[in-house]
């Protein structure tokens, strides 16, 4: 994808979890962010971008921002606490940065970022 995302995403269907279809990362994935390299381990479960189903025709959960969403899902997980001491606002900023770095346009990036800021508290460190 780019120098900042040096690994391809390889996932497999992991079934349903808490009412959502989830996918398991087969191989580790890295994002080289402004705070350093973020390592998402193999086996990590993601539901893609956590977009309500009603908006899927506009924002596909596995759309072009999926690399950034995978990193964000990880940073929102309890598993990330073992390596990264980030609060929710910092995780959201890294998500926005990652979307910028993969070329997501301003309007889409800002819409997704502000939706995460408004509603993301429900999932932070719960997953």
Image (spheres, rainbow, N blue to C red):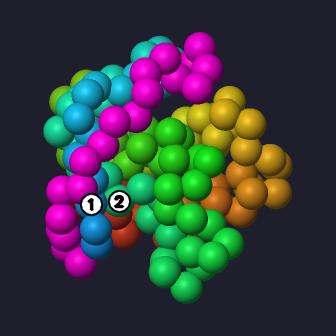
Residue 29 sits inside the magenta stretch:
no
Instruction: Assess disc 2: are there few (<14), some (14-19) or many (≥20) residues with their C-alpha within 10 Å of its C-alpha.
Output: many
Up-down relation of residue 124 to residue 80 (above or below): below
How far across and down, in percent of the image, does residue 37 sit?
Answer: 43, 17
In percent of width and height, residue 28 lies at 28, 25
Q: Sequence order check: which comes first, mark 1 or mark 2?
A: 1
- Stretch of the chain drawn in magenta: 1-19
On the image, which quarter does residue 44 sit in? Answer: top left
SS class, disc 2: loop
Residue 64 in the figure: left or right of residue 39:
right
Is residue 38 among what the camera can see?
Answer: no
What is the magenta segment's predominant secondary structure? loop
Distance of label 1 from label 2 (alpha carbons): 5 Å
Residue that appears at 43% across and 38% down: 71
The quadrant in which the C terminus is found is bottom left
Q: Report x, y in % for residue 42.
A: 21, 32
Q: With respect to residue 45, does 67 lie above or below? A: above
For mark 2, what is the residue? 47
Residue 19: x and y in percent read: 24, 78
């Amino acid at each position: 994808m780019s120098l900042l995302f040096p690994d391809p995403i390889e996932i497999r269907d992991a079934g349903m979890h808490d009412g959502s279809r989830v996918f398991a990362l087969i191989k580790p994935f890295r994002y080289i962010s402004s705070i350093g390299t973020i390592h998402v381990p193999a086996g990590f479960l993601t539901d893609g971008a956590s977009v309500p189903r009603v908006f899927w025709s506009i924002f596909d959960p596995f759309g072009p921002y999926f690399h950034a969403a995978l990193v964000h899902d990880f940073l929102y997980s309890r598993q990330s606490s073992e390596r990264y001491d980030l609060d929710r606002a910092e995780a959201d900023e890294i998500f926005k940065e990652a979307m910028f770095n993969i070329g997501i346009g301003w309007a889409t990036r800002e819409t997704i970022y502000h939706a995460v800021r408004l509603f993301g508290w429900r999932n932070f460190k719960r997953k």
